[in-house]
Amino acid sequence: MATRTIAVVGVPNVGKSTLFNELTGLQQRVGNFPGVTVEPMLGTLRKDGDELTVIDLPGIYGMSAASEDEQLTIDVLRGVHPSIPRPDVIVHVLSADHPSKCFALFAELSTLGLPMVVVATMVDAVKARGGVFDDITLHHRLGVPVMPVVGSKGLGLGELRDALWSNAATLPKLIEVGIASVEERSAWARGVLDEVVVRGREDTTTKLLDRVMLHPVGGALVFLIVMTLFFQSIFSWAQPLMDGIDVFTAMISDVAAQLISNDLLRSFVVRGLIGGVGSILVFLPQIIILNVLVTILEECGYLARAAFLVDRAMGVFGLQGRSFIPLLGSFACAIPGIMSARIIPSYRDRMATIMATPLMTCSARLPVYTLLISSVVPAITIAGGFSLQAAVMVGLYVLGALSGLLVALVLKRTMFRGAVVPFMIEFPPYRMPSLRSIGVTMVHRTRDFVTTAGTVILAFSVALWILTELPRTQPDPSMTELQQQQYQLDNSYAADLGRTIQPIFAPLGFDWRITLGVLSSYAARETFVSAMGQIYAADVAESDAPLRDVLQERIPLRTGLSILAFYVFALQCISTMAIMKRETGSWKWPTLAFGITFAMAYVASLIVYNVF
Amino acid sequence: MSQLLQHLPAGTRCRIISLEGDERHTQRVMQLGLVPGVWCTIVRKAPFGGPLELALDVARLGVRPTRELRIYVDV
């Protein structure tokens, strides 16, 4: 059974990924091709035991690349990609609403010698405004089937699937301008446009909305409101879900603790396994909410406007408007942030942006901040009603963002020196995001997060369990349970390790326990909380008063602030470093980022510890 | 007489005369529709030398020209 491969190709913002999501649903996986930094999505269509592989290639404007994303698509289409096979059929997605640049791309695709099907999106939008899209004339002009599809409503998808199964794709007419200059292709495309499209009324909604959204004052206000809601929803909407997960893990722990009689095994299951998995799952709501919000902002067309608005401000730091999108994403997790840096065409801008992402305050820092701030910062109000604890929290976020931008600036002035790159972005029309597309994104991000980050964190929490619970000691049975746990820890491998490394961190005010917590954070930051829980032998749950009270007693203010300063800067995330390596193609960049951030963290902690 | 796009005030309707600079950049703006001969309107200019919002036939673009991307237009 030979599997045919179908490539979905198109200009950015024509609804290509929506179509791909609608077409293949959850039958998707990230393509795992050796040596590929940009991983295209693969989907499968099945019918009567037959299979079609659908590959979603990054959007292109023509057969010359401006970014790494585009290079991949072009290499695959030309059949020169080392590991991704050349497709058998091209599904060219074009927008009936903005077709001329799509026609220009078609002219280039027609020279490839591959059978094609054209899918026209947004036909409904053209018709709704009283316009006409003549797909029959277009079919005669291009020589391939033209199929109108309304992706968000699923109209025309059945016909498209049938066409793919019945091999309806045909070789296009050879369009001579396909190998001519951009100007000639553009002129040809406008000619086709005049033949097949009768424009309806102007898209006044988009025009009116942009009058506000792109206005220097109005746009800035909308931007601030959107950003406030963005962070608000990540942190407050996620809270009930996170609490729910905490309660759930606690319940499972209790059940497991009662079922297992063997002391060592119980400790392993409850503290090592359940505690470890719980500390991952608790971040899932934030990660999902963030990804859904970014998808919505992107699909409705706002992200392009936001990039336009912040372009000038990003210019101060040597970056451009497009860098905003990966940096914004990094406030939840640097991993999707780094991956979305692929949309930045300039290599230098892209690298500088990637190096700044780990300094954006990701959601894994949040539990560490919450625990430490509530333990060491006095719960008083300052300057007329502002909580000091909240002020410190906001300060840490601002500090992280500014330092990330400064790192980018320094890198742009030194390693990534070069001419100022022009900014250009297309404003897609505003539209309602497709619910199904959001749903599919949600499922995929969840799966990616749980598998990628989950395995690492779980492995480290098991390792931490081994370090803290072994070798087994025989504490005096007359001691309280807490004292027994304390005794076990003081004589564990972890204590040895902490005491060995502690001199390095001594100038920052870290004792061996904190050193151990910080070290365990190098697997993933949030491990600090459970590590503190394990180390201080109190309840692991950060919301529980006991741990907070224990820390309040044990950690003086200056040490607490010194730890916080360390966490603002330090790149303590193996998953982030792994993604950085994959996206930049070398260990040089994650190593450099690790070095820079460690130095920043150490110096900042040193200063803080000695000032307070 | 042709002049640089960014020197014109917002609201100006102008015709693209030529694109100069780094070929990667000029090719890309042409793919986005800014081809010599095409008319466009400067809808808005972001403050402090930020990008320009341009309205073409149907497309709307945000563009910040630099030394590597010089867009000459005629009013």
Image (cartoon, rainbow, N blue to C red):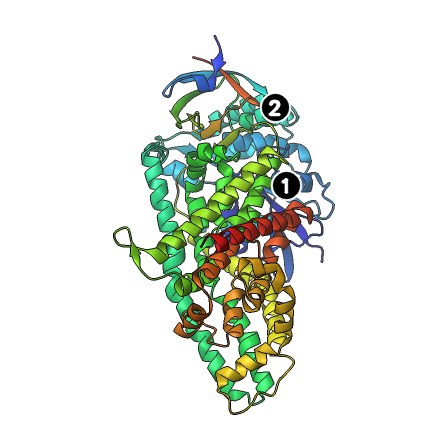
Q: Is residue A117 above or below residue A252?
A: above
Q: Nearer the viewer, residue A392 or A335?
A: A392
Q: CA distance from mark 1 to mark 2?
A: 23 Å
The residue carrying mark 1 is: A73
The answer to whether residue A317 is left or right of residue A505 is: left
Q: Position of residue A2 (x, y in %)?
A: 71, 55
Question: Which secondary structure, mark 2?
Answer: loop
Residue type highlighted by circle 1: Thr
At horizontal 63% and vertical 41% (from top left) the residue drawn is A73
Q: Splitting the image into 4 quarters, where does residue A244 fall?
A: bottom left
Q: Position of residue A462 (x, y in %)?
A: 61, 72
Q: Do the numbered discs 1 and 2 sit on residues whose CB atoms are within 8 Å?
A: no
* Figure quadrant of residue B29: top right
Q: Which mark is residue B22?
A: 2
A391 sits to left or right of A174: left
Q: Residue at x 45, y 45 (%)?
A: A298
Q: Nearer the viewer, residue A3 or A553?
A: A553
Q: Identify the disc placed on residue A2.
A: none
Q: Is residue A460 above or below residue A46?
A: below
* Residue A282 visible to the viewer: yes
In this orientation, which residue lies closer to the viewer: A282 or A66? A282
- Residue, x 53% and y 84% (percent of image)? A484
Question: Which residue is farthest top?
Answer: B1
Q: Nearer the viewer, mark 1 or mark 2?
A: 2
The amino acid on which the numbered mark 2 sits, given as a three-letter code, is Asp
> Which chain letter goes with mark 2?
B
Q: Position of residue B38 (x, y in %)?
A: 48, 19
Q: Residue furthest left?
A: A384
